[in-house]
Image: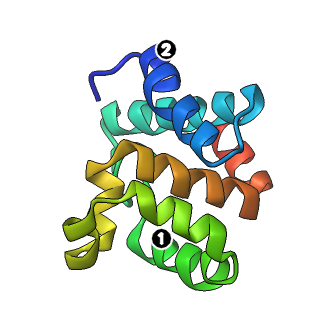
Amino acid sequence: MDISKQELRDQIIHPTLEYLGKAGTAVENLLVAIVTQKQLTHDSKHYNHKGLGPYGIDTSTHQIVWDKYLAFHPDLASRIRGLASQRAFLEDPHSELATNLCYATAIAWVLYILHPQELAHCVA
């Protein structure tokens, strides 16, 4: 990914979290750290791609986010769905993780609220 950490924070992460009403320095730092760690893993010789987009979210995890959490939080689900491309999401919702940074950021944030210990461990 050819975007600096500051650009990622200023142009993607902060506006997305603000749109969701969840802006905060700590979660922004965590999301930047996740992308950085995933990028370092990607650049290593032993890279084994297991997920989509800058956060490396796999399709089964993406499905779980929708089925087990967002299905029960319709207002949040609607806001996140509003970040997705209309046509592309209907044809292949998982592709949004790779092609839509704001959508991927929102899903990564949901993963954080669902499993904060796991994500903090990933970037430690």
Label 1 to label 2: alpha-carbon separation:
26 Å
On the image, the x and y values in percent for residue 5 come to 47, 18
Q: Which residue is label 2 attached to?
A: 6
**Label 2 SS:** helix
On the image, the x and y values in percent for residue 47 come to 33, 45
18 lies left or right of 56: right
- Here the colouring is rainbow
Residue 113 higher or lower than 23, as above or below: below
Q: Which residue is label 1 attached to?
A: 62
Q: Residue, x 43% and y 52% (percent of image)?
A: 103
Q: Residue, x 72% and y 46% (percent of image)?
A: 121
**Nearer to me, 69 or 77:** 77
Query: At label 2, which amino acid type do we have?
Result: Gln
Q: Residue, x 27% and y 22% (percent of image)?
A: 2
**Nearer to me, 63 or 44:** 63
On the image, the x and y values in percent for residue 88 come to 21, 67
